[in-house]
Amino acid sequence: MAKHAKISEGDRVSWRSHGSTAIGTVKRKLTGRGRAAGRTVDASSQEPQYEVRSEKSGGTAVHKPEALSKKPKRRGKSG
């Protein structure tokens, strides 16, 4: 299995969603069983999952780290 970049809260990430690529921000790392993004998540410290918020829709989702790719931070608008 390929090694993925370390993901942390606040990171900007992308993931595949409904045939396209979504971009958003990691809200929190999940390391236990609980509720997130409207569903029950069965994560652990050995197999964490991440709650992310989409930049486009504002919706939240939960993904395993192998589904996420780090993206550069957005730059502020100049002017």
Image (cartoon, rainbow, N blue to C red):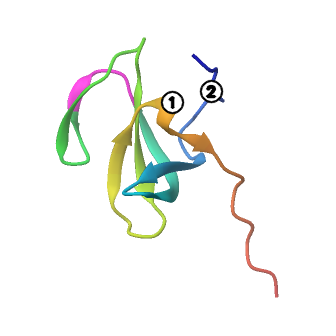
- Which circle's residue, 1 or 2, is located before the other in the chain? 2
Q: Which residue is drawn at 17% across and 41% down?
A: 39
Return the x and y of residue 76 as percentages of the image width and height. 73, 72
Q: Nearer the viewer, residue 19 or 45?
A: 19
Q: Which residue is drawn at 72% across and 53% down?
A: 72
**Where's the N terminus, which quadrant?**
top right
The numbered dot on residue 4 is 2
**Where's the C terminus, which quadrant?**
bottom right
How many marks can you see?
A: 2
- Under mark 2, the amino acid is His
Image check: 16 left or right of 42?
A: right
Q: Nearer the viewer, residue 76 or 46?
A: 46
Quadrant of res 8 = top right
Indicate whether residue 49 is drawn in magenta.
no
Disc 1 to disc 2: CB gap under 8 Å:
yes
Secondary structure mainly formed by the magenta segment: strand
Mark 1: secondary structure: helix
The outermost residue toward the top is 46
Asked if 57 appears above or below 47 in the picture, the reply is below
Q: Which residue is drawn at 33% across and 61% down?
A: 59
Q: Residue at x 56, y 47 (%)?
A: 10
- The Cα–Cα distance between marks 1 and 2, rounded to whole angstroms, is 7 Å
Image check: 9 left or right of 18?
A: right
Return the x and y of residue 32 as percentages of the image width and height. 29, 21
The outermost residue toward the front is 19
The numbered dot on residue 66 is 1
Image check: 78 left or right of 58?
A: right
Return the x and y of residue 57 as percentages of the image width and height. 38, 69
- Under mark 1, the amino acid is Glu
The outermost residue toward the bottom is 79
Q: What stretch is highlighted in magenta?
A: 30-34
Quadrant of res 51 = top left
